[in-house]
Image (cartoon, rainbow, N blue to C red):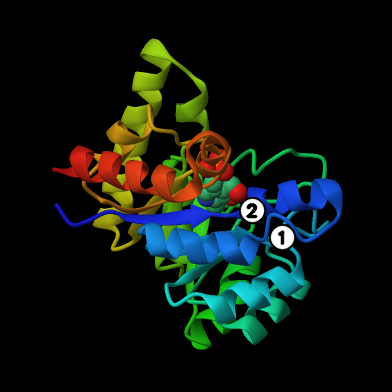
């Protein structure tokens, strides 16, 4: 099986910084540390309300890292304009509601097919690899292919939240979705709510090529330090893949 890439989402370093309004802890420093610890990419979400990452963070991180940046954003004209200026390696289009704590569900691609096809085209033409953050849902995956996205990221939040038989079903749905997407020629990523405990079964899905993990890594870094936590997650992923 191919090596699984680890994208480290550093949004919550900025959440912590913003709690005090100063400059510490610095997301740029966190991104550089993640790179040194073995991250394959840095993921960050510029939300409309700028509650964690801010415009200047995105620009500074882009300058400071040499691994790919995966820029998560809502499908709005303002975000599209920002991305076209920034030219990150990749953009991941996510649904966004102001009142949510995090990205709670997958993107509604089926109902927004025409809008998304037109939205994605200029990003692709600018050389940015576009992915759509979707639920493990057959119709959404076919729609992602139809609108011209080369990549999907499967939302693992439901899988991460449940236990027992429900979790086994959720994992099966992820595996089937990954297989369908791969058969359509899409690259498959996954993320949301992943931790040391629940990552191995997702990492073992052969069609998945990248995991994006944030909240757990930043939270666990309080106890163990960011480098150590990333190294351990890297090890867990490699072991699951072997
Ligand atoms: N992937 C996407 C598209 C996301 O929106 C998020 C959360 O911002 C993540 C991955 C990471 O999720 P978590 O912080 O729960 O690891």
Point out the image quarter for the C terminus: top left
- The reply to whether residue 107 is in sight is no
Query: Residue 165 occupies which quadrant of the picture?
Result: top left
**Residue at which label 1 appears:** 53
Ranked by sequence position, the earlier of labels 1 and 2 is 2
- Measuring from the top left, give residue 106's x and y in whole percent: 57, 45
Marks 1 and 2 in Cβ contact (< 8 Å): yes
For the point 70% across and 62% down, the residue is 46
Asked which secondary structure carries label 2, the reply is helix
Q: Is residue 211 left or right of residue 55?
A: left
- The reply to whether residue 170 is in sight is yes
- Measuring from the top left, give residue 43's x and y in whole percent: 53, 60
- Measuring from the top left, give residue 27's x and y in whole percent: 64, 61
For the point 34% across and 61% down, the residue is 186
**Residue at which label 2 appears:** 11
Query: Badge 1, how many Cα within 10 Å: few under 14, some, many 20+?
Result: many
Using the image, determine if residue 78 lies above or below residue 151. below
For the point 25% across and 50% down, the residue is 207
| Front one among 17 and 176 | 17
């Amino acid at each position: 099986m191919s090596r699984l890439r680890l994208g480290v989402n550093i949004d919550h370093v900025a959440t912590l910084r913003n709690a005090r309004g100063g400059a510490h802890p610095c997301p740029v420093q966190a991104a550089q540390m993640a790179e040194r610890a073995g991250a394959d990419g840095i993921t960050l979400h510029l939300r409309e309300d700028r509650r964690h990452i801010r415009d200047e963070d995105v620009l500074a991180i882009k300058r400071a890292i040499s691994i790919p940046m995966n820029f998560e954003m809502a499908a709005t004209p303002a975000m599209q304009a920002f991305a076209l200026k920034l030219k990150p390696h990749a953009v991941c289009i996510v649904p966004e509601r102001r009142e949510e704590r995090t990205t709670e569900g997958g993107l509604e691609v089926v109902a927004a097919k025409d809008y998304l096809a037109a939205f994605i085209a200029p990003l692709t033409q600018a050389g940015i690899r576009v992915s759509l953050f979707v639920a493990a849902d057959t119709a959404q995956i076919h729609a992602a292919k139809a609108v011209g996205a080369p990549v999907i990221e499967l939302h693992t939040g439901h899988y991460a939240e449940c236990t027992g038989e429900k979790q086994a079903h959720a994992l099966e749905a992820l595996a089937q979705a990954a297989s369908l997407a791969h058969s359509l020629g899409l690259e498959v990523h996954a993320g949301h709510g992943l931790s040391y405990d629940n990552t191995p079964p997702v990492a073992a899905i052969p069609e998945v090529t990248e995991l994006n993990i944030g909240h757990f890594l930043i939270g666990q870094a309080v106890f163990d330090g960011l480098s150590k936590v990333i190294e351990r997650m890297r090890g867990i992923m490699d072991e699951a893949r072997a």
